[in-house]
Amino acid sequence: MIELFYWPTPNGHKITIFLEETDLDYKITPIDITRGAQFDPDFLKIAPNNRMPAIIDSLPQDGGPSISLFESGAILQYLAEKTSHFLPQDVRGKWRVLQWLNWQMGGFGPMLGQNHHFSAYAPEKIPYAIDRYVKESERLYAVLNQALNENEYVAGNYSIADMAIYPWAVSHQRQSISLSDFPNVKKWFDKISERPAVIRAYEVAERYKNSGLSMEDARETLFNQDKHSVSSK
């Protein structure tokens, strides 16, 4: 049994996609980040960075006590190795996938997140910041488009790299990105969107989407964190 600490964000979707693809037995514990559930002391024991998703695996491969993990990329790799699915076993194939997983974790996700923040959430519209992150988003989509020039999926076969990248591309319109400018990405995006497991994962998200606060009401909790947010919780 995998216990998934979840909220319907791109990083949360990564894990539900994997779990639906593999039919692993799992249950969701919602972490309503708009209401500050990510600061609950019990949650911080497994996710000290006060971010979701996180998991607890009650049946780890070594037969020992439960394992808890935070960080969506680490969770995807752990689950892929646990199930022997969506991560090649050969050295070259494995690292081809993991480099793209790390590309998403280190670049595609963070830069698109800043795009979302300054374009949609920031109380003050700062043209320089918006332009900076829209341009960087365009650059990253161009990198992805090039990678898909000769491959159906980013690392060859469908993998955890695709599962990590896809949820961030779902909001491309909000990022001021037109997929028509990136035809390989559009073909890849449409193909993944049609996967039954992906459809099911986004159906899971619908159960939680409307239960949080509005962004205006949640702004203080989500965006005004500093060193005291860690040391005082």
Image (cartoon, rainbow, N blue to C red):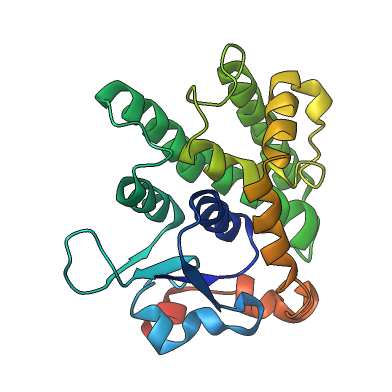
Q: Quadrant of the N terminus?
A: bottom left
Horizontally, is 169 left or right of 181 in the view?
left
x, y percent for residue 108: 57, 40
Q: Is residue 40 visible?
A: yes
The quadrant in which the C terminus is found is: bottom left
> Of residues 200 and 141, which is closer to you in this image?
200
**Residue at left offset 39%, top offset 31%:** 99
Whether residue 233 is visible here, answered yes or no, is no
The percent position of residue 215, horizontal first and vertical second, equals 76, 72
What residue sits 70% from the left and 57% below the top? 202
Q: In the rendered image of this protein, does residue 110 appear above or below residue 46?
A: above
Left or right side of 180 for 26: left
* Identity of the residue furthest to the top in this view: 150
Vertical arrangement, residue 12 with respect to residue 91, above or below: below
Instruction: Indicate the quadrant where residue 47 lies.
Output: bottom left
Tell me where residue 4 appears, x and y as whole percent: 48, 70
Q: Residue at x 49, y 65 (%)?
A: 53
Q: Quadrant of residue 150?
A: top right
Could you tell whether 157 is left or right of 137 in the image?
left
Q: Nearer the viewer, residue 213 or 22?
A: 22
Reply above or below: 209 against 112. below
How many numbered marks are there? Answer: 0
Residue 144 position within the rendered picture, expressed as x and y whole percent measured from the top left: 60, 26
Taking depth in this image into account, of 27 and 46 the one nearest to the observer is 27
